[in-house]
Image (cartoon, helix red, strand yellow):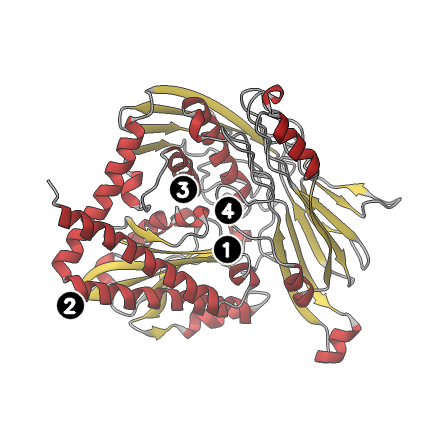
Amino acid sequence: MPTISNILDRDVFQYQLAAIAEEMSAALRRSAFSPIIWDMLDYSCALFAPHGEMLAQAETIPAQLGVMTYAFEGMIKDIPLDTWRPGDVLICNDPYRGCTHTPDIVLMSPVFVEGQLMAVTATVAHHVDIGGKLPSTTAPDNLEVFAEGLLFPPMHVVREGVQNDTVFRFISGNVRNPRACTGDLIAQIAGCRTGEKRVAALVERYGVERFSELVRDTLDYGERYVRNAIAAIPDGMRTAEVFIEDDISSDEPIRLAVSVSIEGEKVKVDFSGSDKQRRNALNCPLASTYSMTLYAIRCMTDMQALSNGGCNRPVEITVPPGSFLNPARPAAVGNRHYAQQAVADVVLKVMAELLPGRSAAGCHISFPTFRAGGFDARPEIIARYGEPRYFIVHDIIGGGMGGYAGGDGLPAVDTHGGNCGVLSAEVVETTSPVRILRSELIEGSGGDGAYRGGLAMRREYELLSDNLMVSVFHQQGSDSTAPWGFKGGGRGRPAGAMLNPGTPGARKLSTKEISLPVGKGDVLRLESAGGGGWGDPSSRSEERRALDLAERYV
C-alpha cells in the first residue's frame, strides 16, 4: 500500500516531468523557422521511459503525440537501444516504421546518467516541405509513399554530439526551402537537448534508483486511473460507421467501421469492416489509427490526471492488415490526416451511445487546406531582392465542434487530432503573394438541437502573382458526410471550396483540387463544416434561441 509520502512524491514528479516537456516545447517553438511551427503550433514534445512508454507530453497536437511510442519501437528495431550513446540524436519519418506521414519528422535522444539510460526525449514537427511533386510535399493522388518526399529510416542525425553534416546537405539539396527545413530540424534538436538537461538534473535530485521507482509508479497510476474510469462504464458493445470522400481513385466514399466493447476494466476496439486501402494518399498508417483511437477513448474517461503511456494499457485495438486504416507498404499516406480525424470521429460516435454524458455530436473534421508555392514576382519583391523569391504557404482553417449534453459546440476550432491555429493573415501576407480577404464565422452552419453545433469558418485568399502552384483540399463536402447530429440534433453544414465566388466565372471545387489553373487576381474561398446538433431542437430554451439571434449564430 503506497504511503501518503509516496503518493505526494509521485504526483509532484508527474508535474516535474510535464514541466520539462513544456520547456522543450518552448525551446522548439521559439527557435523554429517556419510559421507552421511557431504560429500554427504543428509540433509536439514528449518524454519516454527507456522501454518506450510515454512519461509526459506538452499539450500541442494529439495526432503527433500518440504516435511517438510507435516511432520509438520502429527506431529500436533498426538501431537497438543498447547501441545508443550520450549525445546521440536519431531521426525517422517513415510511416511504416511507426511515424505518421513524411512531413512529420521525429527526433529522439537518450538521457544517460551515471552510464545508465534514464529516459528518452522526443520531438516531432511538421516540416512545410520535404520534397515531392507539390509545394508542401503531400498530394492526395500519390500512389506510393516514395512520391511523398524524403524518407528517413531510423538513422543518426547527431552521433555522440557530432552533427552529421552529410544528412543536412542531402536534405538541403532535396527540399524547396532548405533554410527553413534545416533550421526547423535544429530547433527540434534544441528541444531534445533542453529535455536532456532537465531530466538529468531531475535524476540528480532524486537519485537513479528513486527516479526509476517514480517512473514505474507514474505509469502504473495512469493505468489504474483509466481502468477505474472504464469500470464505471456499463459493459456493452456498440458499432458505428462514418464515410469520407475519396474523389481521387473512386467516386465511392470511404467507409470507416468500428465496434467498441466495454468489458470490465478493458476496452476492445475493432475496425474490421472498414474499407480496403485505396489507390490514393488518404490511407491512414497504423500508428495514426492507434493514436486517434487512444485519443477518443481518453476523451471518454473524463481524464483529470496527467496523461502517460500507462493510460493506454487497458485498450486493445484490432485493425485488419491491408485495410484503409492499416495499409501495406508502399501505399501512399501523405494526406492521412483526413482519415485519422475520421478514426476519432467514428470511435466517439460509438462512445456517444455508450456514454452520452461525456460525448458530443459529430465535429468538423473537414480540414480545409490551402497550399501555394512558386516565385513571388511582384515588382516590390524584385526591387527588394533583385529577383523573384521562392515561397511556400500552408494554411488550414477550423470548424464547428459538435453540441454536447449541457452546452453548444465551439466555433472555428481544429478538433480531435489537430490543435493547430489558423495561420495569421499578417504572416500569410508578409511571407507570400497571397492576401487574406476575409476570415469569418458562417451564420447558421451549426446543426440545430437542444444544444447547437459550433459554427464553421470561411476564409478567402486572393492571389497576387502569376504562375503559382495552388492546391486546396477538404472533406465533409456533402450532406451525407457532414457532421452527424445526436439524439435528434441536426447535421452540421457541409464544407466547401469555390474559385472566384460572386463572379460570372465562379466555380465550385471538388474536395481534392491539385495544381489548380489559377492566375493573378483569382480568389479561392474555403469553408469548413459546422458541428452537429445535440438533442431535439424543440427542447432548446427560449433564452438560447434569443442569444442565437442576438449573436447572429443563425
Mark closer to the chain start, 4 or 3: 3
Mark closer to the chain start, 2 or 4: 2
Work out whether residue 448 or residue 136 is closer to the camera in this orientation and state it: 448
Residue at image coords 41%, 31%:
320
The mark found on residue 291 in the picture is 3
Tell me the crowding category of disc 2: few under 14, some 14 to 19, or many 20 or more residues within 10 angstroms, Cα based: few
As displayed, is residue 299 above or below residue 58? above
Residue at image coords 60%, 53%:
422
Q: Label 2 is placed on what type of residue?
A: Glu
Marks 1 and 4, how far apart in space?
A: 8 Å
Q: Which residue is mark 2?
A: 114
Q: Which residue is mark 4?
A: 418
Mark closer to the chain start, 1 or 4: 1
As displayed, is residue 193 above or below residue 321? below
Q: How many marks?
A: 4
Mark closer to the chain start, 3 or 1: 1
Q: Nearer the viewer, mark 4 or mark 3?
A: 4
Q: Nearer the viewer, mark 3 or mark 1?
A: 1
Q: Which residue is mark 1?
A: 42
The image quadrant of residue 428 is bottom right
Residues tagged 3 and 1 counted as in contact (Cβ below 8 A): no
Residues tagged 2 and 3 counted as in contact (Cβ below 8 A): no
Mark closer to the chain start, 2 or 1: 1
In the visual, does 138 lie left or right of 83? right
**Which secondary structure, mark 2?**
loop
Mark closer to the chain start, 2 or 3: 2
